[in-house]
Image (cartoon, grey):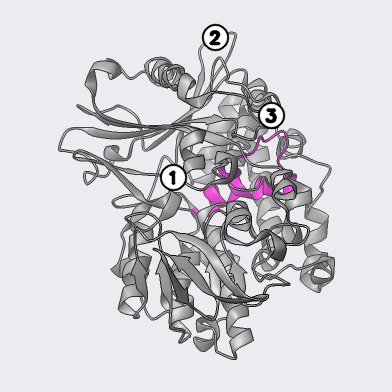
Amino acid sequence: MQLAAAGFDVTVYEAQPVVGGRSRRLTAGPYSFDCGPTFFLMPYVLEEIFSACGFRLSDFASLRRLDPMYRLIIGNCDGAPTVLDTTQDVAHMAERLARIDPRDGAAFRSFMDENRRKLARLTPVLKQRVRSLLDLMSIDGIAAAPYVRPWESVHQCLSKTFSDRRTRLALCFQAKYLGMSPYECPSLFSILPFIEYEYGIWHPEGGCNRIMSAMADACTRMGVRIETSCAVDRIAFDGRKVVGVHAAGSLRRHDRVVVNADGTWAMKNLIPQELRGRDTDAAIDARRYSCSTFMMYLGVRGEVDLPHHTIYMSDRYEETFRDISQLGRLSEDPSTYVHNPSAIDPTLAPAGNSALYVLLPVTNNDPRQCSIDWDRERPRLREDALRQLEGPFGIRDIRRRIEEEILLTPLDWQRERINHGATFNLAHTFDQMLHRRIPHTHPKLAGLHFVGGATHPGSGLPVIFLSSTIASRHICELEGKTHPFDAMGSAAPLPVALAAVR
């Protein structure tokens, strides 16, 4: 969108039959599902992109703010689980946390104030190219430095503020949005729960895939050519200069190529080894990767008495993450996420029925830690998921009500050209952040650019859109064109303070 608005002639090559990648729509009979992300954060980031390109997001998609944002079911080995319906109303949320521990209600307000300051300091860094430590030696980088704390995990950070284990879990599980354990994820990502409570959680009517098709619609109006079912087999070079891509059996010539495939898979499979230097297959695979997911998409007869999002956290929460990230094995009581959009959106299932999305975080398919035969374990994972639906989620008669079903394991994700089946890209460990992620502009291969979760700022739809702005802005600089944000008199997405009151 941004490159087309800047005046470039753009072609999109999409391997799938529909746009969206991991955010595309899946269908099974009369049921529809989001393939990956199921809610939207910080819609102002995308509103600014649409506006800069001459459109209004509201003309393409309808977004609804959720309250409750989600329901948390926190396991307790000594008794019944704690059930917590979260709300963006900070005063009410503080009251609900105070019922868990009186000290944590007041601490929640302090948490919001502290992370508001933290995000304000980090936001300029999230929006700029970071090629080396020198790029961080700016006023913005120095202002953000005290909030980085590489020695501290999200859970350790929250343990200094909140007294009760359940409160800490309620505010650290968001590390899973990055495919990481909160016991390993760097503490700067405490901004994730803050962003939810500050800006809300939003449901696009029809699912998050509607955001992707909305962007495709806008691109088409601007003359962008979108070729679906057209996988790129490799990038074409003349020496160290990009000349196009090989797709659908032919060379398609282009002056620049922007790679939005899985970043490390693309490095290994689309670029010849002799051009990659130190980035050998072995070196790429030696990096740390996020977890993967077992997915179950169910078309269910009848309604399901769950809110839009429900998350079950086992009383063995820390152990389950050790199973996933260190031991490479399946957990006995897996934490589980259920998306029930039919509770508020009638477009995804036949009238009176439900389209359920069930996610179990599991180890990725990296052979250094995983020896699981996913095809053999598929029935066990399905049984684990159904057992959780019947147990903590309390869905009665779920087995006999299933009308349609799709299952995906890490092996299926890997077959979709995702390295190790790690659905959240490179892990966000401190040594793989900022300039240590894949660069937006390749330093040694002219005309080659990257966007997506493997680049800075990282995974998650809002920051992936920030990545697209960083890359498109640099391409405009290289070609002497005006970026659409500059053309409209705005140097970047809306300031944090303004966005909060919108």
Q: Do we see residue 101 in this rendering?
A: no
Q: In the rendered image, which quarter contains the N terminus?
A: bottom left
Q: Amino acid at mark 2?
A: Gly
Chief secondary structure of the magenta portion: helix
The residue closer to the viewer here, 317 or 16, is 16
Q: Does dot 2 land on a helix, a strand or a loop? A: loop
Q: Quadrant of residue 239?
A: bottom right
Residue at horizontal 39 percent and vertical 63 percent from the top = 248
**N-terminal-most mark, 1 or 2:** 1
**N-terminal-most mark, 1 or 3:** 1
Residue at horizontal 34 percent and vertical 58 percent from the top = 229
Q: Which residues are magenta?
A: 177-199
Are the residues tagged 3 and 2 within 8 Å (C-beta)?
A: no
Q: Quadrant of residue 95?
A: top right
Q: Is residue 63 magenta?
A: no
Cα–Cα gap, marks 3 and 2: 34 Å
Residue at horizontal 81 percent and vertical 72 percent from the top = 139
**N-terminal-most mark, 3 or 2:** 2
Horizontal relation, residue 133 to residue 79: left or right? right
Q: Does dot 1 land on a helix, a strand or a loop? A: loop
Residue at the spot of label 1: 36
* Label 1 crowd (10 A; few <14 / some 14-19 / many >=20): many
User: Residue 148: x and y, percent?
Assistant: 78, 53
Cα–Cα gap, marks 1 and 2: 33 Å
Horizontal relation, residue 321 to residue 417: left or right? right
In this view, the residue farthest toward the left is 351
Residue at the spot of label 2: 79
